[in-house]
Image (cartoon, helix red, strand yellow):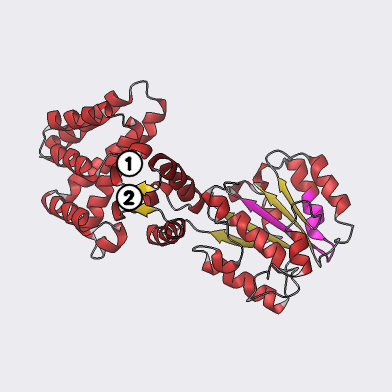
């Protein structure tokens, strides 16, 4: 049976968790020392490994023969906990089970001992979705939990949690991943899957993921299905709806040269080729940001992660453009990206922004 990439390569041990060493190291030390807390709070952006880490930790604290802090996967308890129907690791989606009655049900069930494990673990995903009365009911359980119970609360919006809940949990903040870390991970997966992909395509896929492992693998899944496993830069741009570096650089260069006609013509070409105008605006804004990095940072190549050819093009244009002009373009296009959510005509809005860049620049001179 076919499995999606993000499911097939879901981490099974702490060593498999990508880019969250500050968290996995602490959890491994707790497991090895036996100092297990009664409640944990995993917070961070989507697709950074919160739920996967929670599942691994739930198994590891119950494993009869942990390997370097990770579950062995072979002992009787590990095999029992791998069964989706096991009663010792309980996963709850707070988005659909957010009422006080569901939490009261948990309060009643925590009194019972685990069936085959040392700890009974409750993993509550998107915990910020609980109602106020449900939080109050959960708080009573967190204050005096039975010794055999461990709670793992996961959320993408920690600011919505009551301070009383946060203060009773050991908190771990999951970070978005650097592009270089994501690219290394994706290359490893593609090698195992025998998928062909060039460097430019890797960079495009990774950038579109914006630091999320799961988003990256979901995007890669769609591209693999579209290409049949032999991925090229043009195909990736077709799937993502993005514009290439040359077009973005030429648009920004045209704005600096006050050639709004050329900029609008390039925008029209992107539109006629089927590009999403919202994504085009983001691509132009990203291009301006990358030019600022190329112009101001000594380690720009490491930050941008471009191939040598692409990086040289950015450096060449960055040398010719005044930093103040780039800052103006960044401010204007950042506003456009927000306004596009409500725009009836995205193309007109972007064209207006282009004219604003030139007029603003002329006023300054």
Q: Position of residue 142 (x, y in %)?
A: 78, 57
Identity of the residue furthest to the top in this view:
344
**Residue 282, quarter of the rendered image:** top left
**Residue 56, quarter of the rendered image:** bottom right
Q: Say which mark, if any, is on residue 235.
A: 1
Q: Position of residue 333 (x, y in %)?
A: 29, 37
Residue 85 shows in the view = yes
Q: Looking at the rendering, in which quadrant would you find the C terminus?
A: top left
Q: Which residues are magenta?
A: 138-155
Say which of 115 and 140 sits in front. Answer: 115
Q: CA distance from mark 2 to mark 1?
A: 9 Å
Read off the residue under disc 2: 201
Question: Does residue 268 sit above or below 100 in this rendering?
Answer: above
Say which of 177 and 228 sits in front. Answer: 228
Q: Position of residue 178 (x, y in %)?
A: 41, 59
The answer to whether residue 120 is left or right of residue 208 is right
Q: Residue at x 33, y 26 (%)?
A: 346
């Amino acid at each position: 049976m076919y499995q999606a990439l993000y499911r097939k390569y879901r981490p099974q041990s702490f060593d498999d968790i990508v880019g969250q060493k500050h968290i996995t190291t602490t959890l491994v030390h707790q497991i090895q020392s036996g100092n297990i807390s009664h409640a944990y709070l995993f917070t961070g952006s989507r697709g950074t490994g919160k739920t996967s880490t929670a599942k691994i930790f739930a198994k590891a604290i119950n494993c009869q023969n942990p390997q370097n802090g990770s579950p062995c996967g072979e002992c009787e308890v590990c095999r029992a906990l791998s069964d989706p129907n096991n009663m010792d690791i309980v996963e709850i989606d707070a988005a659909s089970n957010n009422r006080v009655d569901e939490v009261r049900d948990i309060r009643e069930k925590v009194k019972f001992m685990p069936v085959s494990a040392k700890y009974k673990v409750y993993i509550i995903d998107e915990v910020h979705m609980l109602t106020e009365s449900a939080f109050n009911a959960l708080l009573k359980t967190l204050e005096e939990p039975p010794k055999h119970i461990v709670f793992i609360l996961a959320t993408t919006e920690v600011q919505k949690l009551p301070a009383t809940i946060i203060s009773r949990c050991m908190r771990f903040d999951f970070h978005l991943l650097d592009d270089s870390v994501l690219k290394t991970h994706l290359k490893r997966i593609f090698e195992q899957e025998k998928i062909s992909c060039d460097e430019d395509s890797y960079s495009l896929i990774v950038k579109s993921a914006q630091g999320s492992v799961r988003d990256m693998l979901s995007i890669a899944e769609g591209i693999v299905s579209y290409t049949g496993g032999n991925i090229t830069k043009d195909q990736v741009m077709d799937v993502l709806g993005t514009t290439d570096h040359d077009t973005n650089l030429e648009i920004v260069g045209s704005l600096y040269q006050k050639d709004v006609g050329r900029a609008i013509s390039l925008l029209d070409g992107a539109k006629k080729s089927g590009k999403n105008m919202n994504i085009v605006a983001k691509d132009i804004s990203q291009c301006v940001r990358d030019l600022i990095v190329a112009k101001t940072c000594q380690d720009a190549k490491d930050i941008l992660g471009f191939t040598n050819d692409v990086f040289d093009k950015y450096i060449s244009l960055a040398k010719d453009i005044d930093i103040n002009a780039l800052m103006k373009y960044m401010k204007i296009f950042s506003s456009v990206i927000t306004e596009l959510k409500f725009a009836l005509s995205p193309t007109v809005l972007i064209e207006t922004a282009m004219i604003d860049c030139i007029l603003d620049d002329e006023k300054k001179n």
